[in-house]
Every structure is written in structure tokens, then in C-alpha cells.
Image: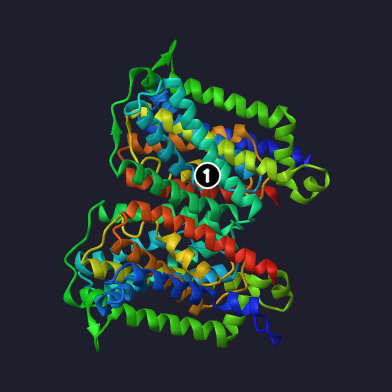
């Protein structure tokens, strides 16, 4: 990842995500005068924060050349569990949220077990989990929203500390922790190594199985956290919440330069990638483009981002 | 000997599981083993069955197609609109819908082979794009009221066989013949087994990979037509998560995700197992919310079973 020789192409691909971010920003600023209003910019950051948190966890799985398609369903299930346990089971906000976070890690651990022990390809194991967790959400909620969460819970999604919305603060904390873990810890090194070359990793005495278990638990945790924040923001848990969010959560790291083949990428890129998606949605909204058509654009951007990534990697 | 044991337990293991499932449900509820319920199960499994044929082709090349559910919805609403507001004749509308399905599959195949984008990424993108197009095209509203001539493919019957079952049988037979008795099928197995060797043997692997995604697209479109003909309505949200049921059927049927190993017979049994399970849950008054949970667990069990078998 670190090169001593100066290469314009490497530099370009390293900062390409920031260049794209800037480019889109300029286009929307010219296209709509509301875009650069401070309120709108804060709004973008708020809307981006939840997907960015989930995408940070996704970055870990993709770095090991894996994938987690179950994040949208885990968000919905854990968001519903947190609300249900807090309100219906009377465990209170703290108890509900803690248990929901643990549930997210457990679901991630099951993904990890199916992949490591069961030898299932990651996209199959997590596709099955996507269906199972969505089904469990419908079973748990009976297909109806869960409302009635208290002030403290709602504060997590809608409150502000020193003028900054709480989800943005949580996003920054998660991104900083993840960044430090990946860059400066032995575990982070092993995550890159597992994705870079699993065989070499094994020969170097690292157990790729343990690392993989860990990354799916991390992804389950960040998905649960994202689901809880989504519940807080909407004042209620919706059984169909976060349907299709796995696409955004995968697109963010890919736009941010994380290779789907593992071993290459970083958290900073993922957060920038999440902001590209957030700005794109916001700008398209301001321009009055229907949410249906936005789906088409998102899908095309997703595929183009992967093609661009493969193209620059091959050139190197 | 070992190989024989393996194929035997793979083939007949599933048959035994299926029969035991039927027997168990027959004992649990007397509504299960009736002729009308059996026909019902078959009719319900036709749509998943048709999609699963294409999915088998794709998975045999070590690929995957997550976009079939969305392709079904998009081709469904386009066909319905051709029939309803454009006044296109029934055969022409059907051909147009199938062609659209083929085109979407072609796009998948070209992106996968020419740009080397992993299949699950390409088809995940297509899943979103085709769904968005279906919603944009209809502005989120269903298109209802289709001509009787068209509705026959969903509600009519040939002799005593309901039309959808008849169509699914033809699709299965065609799929079977192509896969097992043509060079085309041989190449699909070969490139799934070992793409590098297939390329060295002079097989233009890209062409065959594109071909399987086109097949998946056409069959998704065909399934969509049966669905809208039966419901007399094309919903832009139709086919949600259908890819999951199709993949489940293929996996339960013993086709390997690493490609080159599997059969359409297995897929057929897989489709029936899943249909019977869902039907049984219905008859036992289990909430339909549990269906994906049960299917997901069945996938995991099947994969672990085959993994043990392949050791």
C-alpha cells in the first residue's frame, strides 16, 4: 500500500474518492442553491452517518475478501429487538440496546461459523442470514412497527451534543476506533493479511478462521448499532427497515477504494464513499428526481465503481 | 466404489428426505395428502421451478444471479403494459418480454466476462437497477386487467394439467436436454469444473458464461409472465427475494457453488422440498413470516450435509 516511488496514477487512485466527492459536490452546488446551506450539509452528514457506521463494519469483511449481505436484515432485527426489549419487555433503554448489540454480534458469529466451519461461500451464508434475520424480524414484530421508545432512546437518533447530532458523533467515534484498529494493531495487520493471501497468512502462523470470525462479529455489531440508531431516528422500529441497505453498505467501501478481492482499503475511504452516496441521494432529492429512479442510478454507480476499481488495480 | 456411494446418497438421500417430509406432513395433517393439495403444491412450485432451472445453469459455472426476482418484476410490468395500453398482440408481447429478460441477462453476462466484475456484485447491482426501472416505469403502481388470451398461461389447463405446470415441465425438459445431451451443456460443466483447462481446450468460456445469464434472464421473464397471468396484475414489487428461493432449491438439490457439479434432477427435487415445506407450514397454521427462516436453515443444513458427503 505504501510506495516510495512517485506514481501519478497511484496518487490519483489513492485520492480518487476525494476527487469524486469534490466533483459531485461542485455539480450539486451549481445545480441547486440549497445544497451548500449549512443546514443541508448537516442534514447530509446526519443521513450518511448510519450507513457509514454499517459500512465501516462491512469494510472489515471485504478486507478479508468476504462480504456481508445480511447487514440490512440484522439492522432491522436488532433495531426491533432494542425497541421491543426496552418497551415491551420492560428492560429499559439501556438493557434493550445492550442486548440488541449482543444479538448483532451473535448473528455475526453465526455468519462466521457457517463460513469458517461450514465452508460456505460468504455471500451464500450471509444471503441465508439475510432471509432468516428478516423473517425473525417479522416474527418478533408480528409485521407491525414497535413504537413508544423513551426520550433517552430517541436522543440517540435526534439529539445534539454541542450542536452536533448524536449519530454523527457515534459515526466519528466508530470510524476512528476502526481506523486505529486496522492501522496500528496486530489484529488489523492480520485482517489485511487474511485478505491479501490466506495461504501465506496461515504459513505465517495466523489463523485466518479466527480473523474471519472476528470480522463478521464486527460487521454484526456495527449493523446492530446502525439499526438501533435508525430506530431512534424514526421514533419506532419498522419490520421492513433497512431493506436493500446492504447495497449502500457495500458500495461505500468499494467507492472508497476497498478491493472486493481483499487486502486493500481503509476506513477513511469508506467514510468518504458513504458521503458520496449520501450527497448523491441528497442532491438527486433536491433536483426532484424520484426515489424509484434514484435506485437505478445507485445500481449503475455501484457497478461503475467496481469496474473503475478493477481498472485502476489492473493498471498498477 | 466411493464415487458410487457419493452419487447414490446424493441422489437418493434427497428423495428419501422428500418422501419422509411428505409422510410426516401426511401424518400431521390430513389435508396434505389430497389430490387438490398436491396439484396446489405443484402449481405453487412452478414459478420457483422455472427460475431455478436458470439458476442451476448459472451456479454450474460457479456464478450466481441475484437479479432474477427484479428481472421478473421488470419484464412482468413491461409485458403487461404492452398488452394493456399498447394493444400489442399476446404472442408478440410474450416474445418482447422474453427478449427483455434475455437482454438484461446479456448485460449481466457482459459485465461479468468483459469487466471481470464478480457475479454476485454485478447481479446485486442489476437487482437494484431492474427493480428501480420497474418502479419508475409503473410509478410504483400495479398494472391490472390483462387480456383473457394471455391469462390462459397462468390460469388455463391442458387436459387436466394446469398450464403453468405444463410450461414448467417443457422448460425443465428443454433445460435437461441442453445440459445433458448437447456440446453446449458439456462446455457449461467443463468451464465450471476448471475454467482454465476449458480455455486451454479451446472453449470460448466468455460466450458460455454470457449464455447462462441470458438463460437465467429468459426464464425469470417466463416465470414473471405466469405470475402476472395468474394474478391478472403486474406488480413492480413482485418477485422480491425470489432469487433466495431459487438459490435454495439449487443448493438443496446438491449443485456445488464451486461449479461443475450438480444436476437439474437435484434442483427439481430441491424445488419440491421447499414447496412442500412451505405448504406444510401453511397447513399447520405457522405464520408465513417463518418461511424464510425455515428456508435459510434448510440451506445451511443442506450445505453442511453435502460438505460432509464430499469429504
Q: Is residue A304 left or right of residue B282?
A: right
SS at circle 1: helix
Where's residue A24, x and y in %?
42, 70
The answer to whether residue B273 is seen in the rendering is: yes
Res. A33 image quadrant: bottom left
- Determine whether B152 is above or below B59 in the image: above
Q: Is residue A111 left or right of residue A244?
A: right
Q: Is residue B115 left or right of residue B35?
A: right
Q: Residue at x 46, y 41 (%)?
A: B71
Q: Nearer the viewer, residue A298 or A283?
A: A283
- Determine whether A191 is above or below B37 in the image: below
Where's residue A153, x and y in %?
23, 74
Where's residue A57, x and y in %?
47, 72
Q: Residue at x 60, y 85 (%)?
A: A186
Q: Which residue is mark 1?
A: B247
The answer to whether residue A191 is seen in the rendering is: no
Q: Nearer the viewer, residue B134 or A26?
A: A26
Q: Residue at x 69, y 72 (%)?
A: A316
Residue found at the very far front of the displayed protein? A30
Res. A312 image quadrant: bottom right
Q: Residue at x 60, y 24 (%)?
A: B173
Amino acid at each position: 500500500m505504501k510506495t516510495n516511488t512517485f506514481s501519478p496514477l497511484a496518487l490519483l487512485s489513492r485520492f480518487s474518492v476525494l476527487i469524486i466527492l469534490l466533483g459531485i459536490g461542485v455539480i450539486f452546488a451549481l445545480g441547486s442553491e440549497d445544497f451548500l446551506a449549512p443546514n443541508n450539509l448537516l442534514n447530509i452528514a446526519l443521513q450518511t452517518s448510519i450507513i457509514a457506521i454499517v459500512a465501516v463494519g462491512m469494510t472489515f469483511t471485504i478486507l478479508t475478501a468476504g462480504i456481508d449481505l445480511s447487514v440490512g436484515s440484522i439492522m432491522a432485527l436488532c433495531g426491533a429487538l432494542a425497541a421491543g426489549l426496552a418497551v415491551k419487555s420492560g428492560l429499559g433503554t439501556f438493557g434493550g440496546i445492550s442486548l440488541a448489540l449482543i444479538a448483532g454480534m451473535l448473528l455475526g458469529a453465526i455468519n462466521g461459523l457457517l463460513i469458517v466451519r461450514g465452508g460456505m461461500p460468504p455471500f451464500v451464508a450471509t444471503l441465508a442470514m439475510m432471509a432468516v434475520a428478516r423473517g425473525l424480524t417479522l416474527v418478533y414484530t408480528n409485521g407491525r412497527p414497535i413504537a413508544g421508545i423513551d426520550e433517552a432512546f430517541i436522543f440517540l437518533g435526534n439529539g445534539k451534543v454541542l450542536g452536533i447530532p448524536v449519530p454523527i458523533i457515534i459515526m466519528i467515534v466508530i470510524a476512528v476506533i476502526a481506523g486505529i484498529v486496522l492501522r496500528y494493531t496486530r489484529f488489523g495487520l492480520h485482517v489485511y493479511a487474511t485478505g491479501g493471501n490466506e495461504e501465506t497468512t496461515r504459513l505465517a502462523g495466523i489463523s485466518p478462521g479466527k480473523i474471519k470470525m472476528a470480522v463478521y462479529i464486527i460487521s454484526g455489531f456495527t449493523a446492530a448499532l446502525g439499526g438501533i440508531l435508525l430506530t431512534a431516528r424514526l421514533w419506532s422500529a419498522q419490520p421492513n427497515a433497512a431493506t436493500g441497505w446492504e447495497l449502500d453498505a457495500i458500495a461505500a467501501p468499494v467507492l472508497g477504494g476497498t478491493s472486493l478481492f481483499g487486502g486493500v482499503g481503509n476506513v477513511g475511504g469508506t467514510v468518504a464513499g458513504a458521503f458520496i452516496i449520501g450527497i448523491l441521494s441528497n442532491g438527486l432529492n433536491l433536483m426532484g428526481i424520484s426515489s424509484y429512479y434514484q435506485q437505478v442510478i445507485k445500481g449503475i454507480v455501484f457497478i461503475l465503481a467496481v469496474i473503475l476499481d478493477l481498472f485502476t488495480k489492473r493498471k498498477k | 466404489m466411493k464415487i458410487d456411494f457419493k452419487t447414490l446418497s446424493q441422489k437418493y438421500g434427497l428423495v428419501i428426505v422428500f418422501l419422509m417430509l411428505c409422510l410426516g406432513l401426511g401424518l400431521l395433517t390430513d389435508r396434505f395428502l389430497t389430490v387438490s393439495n398436491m396439484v396446489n403444491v405443484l402449481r405453487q412450485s412452478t414459478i420457483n421451478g422455472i427460475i431455478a432451472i436458470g439458476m442451476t445453469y448459472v451456479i454450474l459455472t460457479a456464478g450466481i444471479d441475484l437479479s432474477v426476482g427484479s428481472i421478473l418484476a421488470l419484464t412482468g410490468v413491461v409485458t403487461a403494459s404492452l398488452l394493456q395500453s399498447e394493444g400489442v398482440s399476446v404472442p408478440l408481447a410474450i416474445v418482447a418480454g422474453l427478449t427483455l429478460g434475455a437482454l438484461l441477462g446479456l448485460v449481466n453476462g457482459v459485465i461479468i466476462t468483459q469487466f471481470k466484475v464478480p457475479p454476485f456484485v454485478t447481479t446485486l447491482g442489476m437487482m437494484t437497477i431492474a427493480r428501480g426501472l420497474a418502479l419508475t416505469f409503473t410509478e410504483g403502481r400495479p398494472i391490472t386487467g390483462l387480456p383473457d388470451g394471455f391469462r390462459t398461461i397462468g390460469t388455463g389447463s391442458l387436459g387436466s394439467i394446469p398450464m403453468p405446470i405444463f410450461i414448467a415441465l417443457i422448460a425443465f425438459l428443454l433445460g435437461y436436454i441442453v445440459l445433458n445431451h448437447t456440446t453446449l451443456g458439456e462446455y457449461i460443466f467443463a468451464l465450471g469444473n476448471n475454467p482454465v483447462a476449458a480455455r486451454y481446450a479451446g472453449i470460448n468460456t466468455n460466450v458460455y458464461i454470457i449464455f447462462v445469464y441470458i438463460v437465467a434472464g429468459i426464464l425469470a421473464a417466463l416465470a414473471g409472465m405466469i405470475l402476472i397471468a395468474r394474478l391478472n396484475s403486474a406488480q413492480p414489487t413482485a418477485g422480491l427475494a425470489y432469487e433466495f428461493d431459487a438459490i435454495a432449491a439449487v443448493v438443496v438439490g446438491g449443485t456445488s457453488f464451486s461449479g461443475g457439479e450438480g444436476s437439474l434432477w437435484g434442483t427439481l427435487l430441491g424445488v419440491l422440498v421447499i414447496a412442500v415445506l412451505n405448504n406444510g407450514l401453511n397447513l399447520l397454521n405457522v405464520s408465513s413470516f417463518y418461511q424464510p427462516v425455515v428456508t435459510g436453515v434448510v440451506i445451511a443444513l443442506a450445505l453442511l450435509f453435502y460438505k460432509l458427503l464430499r469429504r
